[in-house]
Image: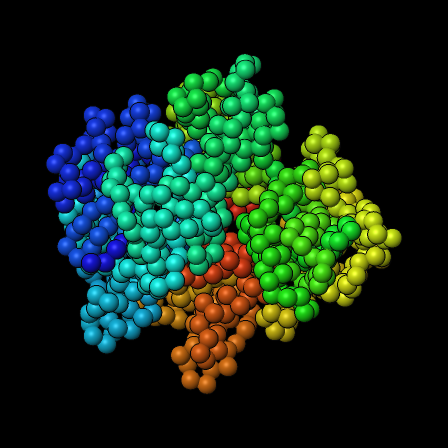
Amino acid sequence: MKNIVTGFVAHVDAGKTTLSESLLYITHTTRHQGRVDHKDTLLDFDQQERDRGITIFSKISNINYLDTHFTFLDTPGHVDFSGEMERALSVLDYAILIVSGIDGLQAHTKTIWKLLSHYRIPTFIFVNKMDISPYTKHELLDNLRELSDNIIDIEKMNYEEMAMTDDALLEEYMQTNALSKESLVKAIQERKLFPVIFGSALKNDHVQELLDMLDTYTIPHSTQNELSASVYKIDHDDKGERLTYVRIYDGMLHVKQLINEEKINQIRLYQGNKYTLLEEAGAGSVVVLTGLKETQSGDIIGRGKPHTSYLQPYMHYQLHLADNENQGKMLENLRLLAQEEPLLNMKIQDAQHIEVSLMGEIQIEILKEIIRERYHEEVTIDSKQISYKETILDSVEGVGHFEPLRHYAEVHILLEPLPTGSGIEYENRCMNNLPENYQRLIMTHLQEKVHLGVLTGSPLTDIRFVLLGGKAHDKHTVGGDFREATYRAVRHALIRTTSILLEPYGKYVLKIPSAFISKAFYDLDSEQPPIITDDNGTTATIKGQAPIEMLSNYTQEVLNYTKGEGTLSIEETYYAPVKEPEEIIEQFHYNPEQDLENPTGSIFCTHGAGYYVPWQMVEEKMHLDYFIKEEKEAAPITHRKMHISDEEVKRVFENTYGKQERKLAKDFYGSKKKEHTPTVLSNTYQQKPECLLVDGYNVIFAWDELNKIAKTNLGAARDKLLDIMSSYQGYRDNTVIVVFDAYKVPGNPGSKTQYHNLYVVYTKEQQTADAYIEKATKEIANHYRVVVATSDNAEQTIVVGHGATRVSSRELKELVEHTNTYGQAEYNRKNPIVPDTPLDHLKKD
């Protein structure tokens, strides 16, 4: 029997728990099918969950069906508890995304889809509540394909439609006129195909078919003998016993087995809030261990790499304890609570200074209630503030030296800036003979700490930490020396380069009565200008991007001025440079050289005693030379000038795409005697020029009008696409490159030509458009704000990894239509047809 770990994910009220109850009931695992509204479900056993009718904590259920043992994880759907959901995602083999047939896709559904893509989880889709849905299957399927064009109604078994999702499937279909089960399993496993089933969990409609599909098209994780398990959750039971939730990938766990010098007391297999004790558990199991006091969420037991959270709260608050004699005990209780929810990022200085990070108002209320129920104490939570982050502008090498008497370590760390949204990365490029055990130790120290920036002391992001080298002493290097040297090397690097202060931004969708469009534009236009994507005269949909700080306050304002008819949802969040950082930096009063817990200098030894050397003088005394020889002068955190000339842009373009007959502005107008060089503050952001890369054939087959033309004349469809994109470029004023596959043409050397204001690329033999776009994206991402238009799911994932923004072919069509429509309207507004004489208009009468 194969073991499959599957999770239910969805936006709130889509029916995850109801589907869990249906699966348990139809497989005869339970005798009674519970209902959320009756407050008698197996999995929502927490009192707050039953009172509120929502899932707050992830739960486990186990089902045997035909050839498969399924472990199902029911996850929270409310956006405030996304952290609990994400921790469960990290251990899944497959996911079941549940979408309400009444509501369709929601903003949070799209966030979940991005998480599933981030963790590379194969996904099945169940459209629920079809018994009361006002929409047809076809309408809902069109709605779902905003997530991916590769979502297929599996019940139709339309081989031709399935084959269009993947080249390998297409080739098999062309040869056999069918698709094998093994090929479909592989396509699903590789996230090239996403099967969907329509039904009703409450009525048990098509739930059996969902189980059959899961049994047929899933394969277990390949196993090895060496132990590998992942900790995804820490909790405490009613008796205060600490519980460690683990997914076992390989090997076995036994009662009394030692894990990091701690003994496993019990192995529990949970079914809701009840459990069975096991003597051992093997690969494919999700179990709970007791007796372990030091484990943390995200830890790896045995072989494997720890994972870091993709989602992060953007607000932090002050938590105030009641002024009584229990404050000391409460501080210990809060530390235990922080282990259960790592995203609280709880910082406790003393009873008067407690800071927590939270996702929203409901999580605030839940946290208060948990503290009240468990510890019988009342707390207040207030003083909402934005959670800022910091990154760097340029690569820089830092040195950390730690040499008190009878201690010794020196470490060289390179910090490299990464594209927005990359998070933190680590790499070992050791360039000297530092022993491997010390290299591993340094990499561990880099990853174990949340490194802080030097502008405000906020956490770092979008940086790669690279080990360049180090030095140890045969006699004097002891435990902890490399930790000190590593931390100091990071701080030394940060203070030597230019830092950038970041704040969270959100991509929002505002739905309001059309009468309030002007009001919304007035409120939001101070940020990036919003776009009206739909207006039927009654209701309008407006999309845009703005700081989270503004959006968090604007939600209530929308409800007020629309009298409850408007909604504001945030589809995606990211960090971007603060526009006016000086005032914020001043408010923090942070001095990195006075931060004793994160020193920027190093410790050297002379005459038998260690002494502190400030960061400015470290390179004079360091024992190893810089590994990166082309060192720039250390940049203070002040102003710096930056100018990118037309020649430089042209050079970058030609290095990537070859020689082009493209004239610069000065070729037409001549060089100016005095060139204005803009002054850029070191911690602000300068917008890069946009470069749009279009996967030509992918777009042609995705757009109905072009696909129709292509069926009779592919060349005409190509020309039509180029004309459309040429018009779009004229309004957008960006660089547009349309790439066509020519990899099957024997002896084809490839070509790059100019078509009006576009660049057209035909790939060479054995080079696909995907490969060309991936290569081009990687090469120009540092100089251009790259946008890639394709509906190829694998390609979308790859280009995002290289720092590009991706849009689907469907989204590109909407963007082009919107730009052309509003561009023409703006042109007409600025160039009105004026009568030749004051009396001309009378002649029309």
The image shows residue 90 at horizontal and vertical percentages of 40, 49
Q: Is residue 465 visible?
A: yes
Q: Nearer the viewer, residue 291 or 627?
A: 291
Q: Quadrant of residue 597?
A: top right
Residue 746's place in the image compared with 626, above or below, is below
The image shows residue 125 at horizontal and vertical percentages of 27, 49
- In this view, the residue farthest toward the top is 324
The residue located at (38%, 39%) in the rendering is 243
**Is 774 left or right of 499, judged from the image as shown?**
left
How many numbered marks are there? 0
Q: Is residue 84 visible?
A: no
The image shows residue 177 at horizontal and vertical percentages of 20, 72
Q: Nearer the viewer, residue 272 or 99?
A: 272
Q: How is the image coloured?
A: rainbow
**Is 114 left or right of 637, judged from the image as shown?**
left
Residue 119's place in the image compared with 73, above or below, is below
- In this view, the residue farthest toward the bottom is 747
The residue located at (14%, 34%) in the rendering is 32
Residue 448's place in the image compared with 514, above or below, is below
**Is 6 left or right of 28, judged from the image as shown?**
right
Q: Nearer the viewer, residue 10 or 658?
A: 10
The image shows residue 217 at horizontal and vertical percentages of 23, 59
**Is 618 left or right of 370, judged from the image as shown?**
right
Residue 634's place in the image compared with 533, above or below, is below
Q: Classify the position of the N terminus by image quarter.
A: bottom left
The residue located at (46%, 18%) in the rendering is 377
The residue located at (34%, 53%) in the rendering is 253
- In this view, the residue farthest toward the right is 607
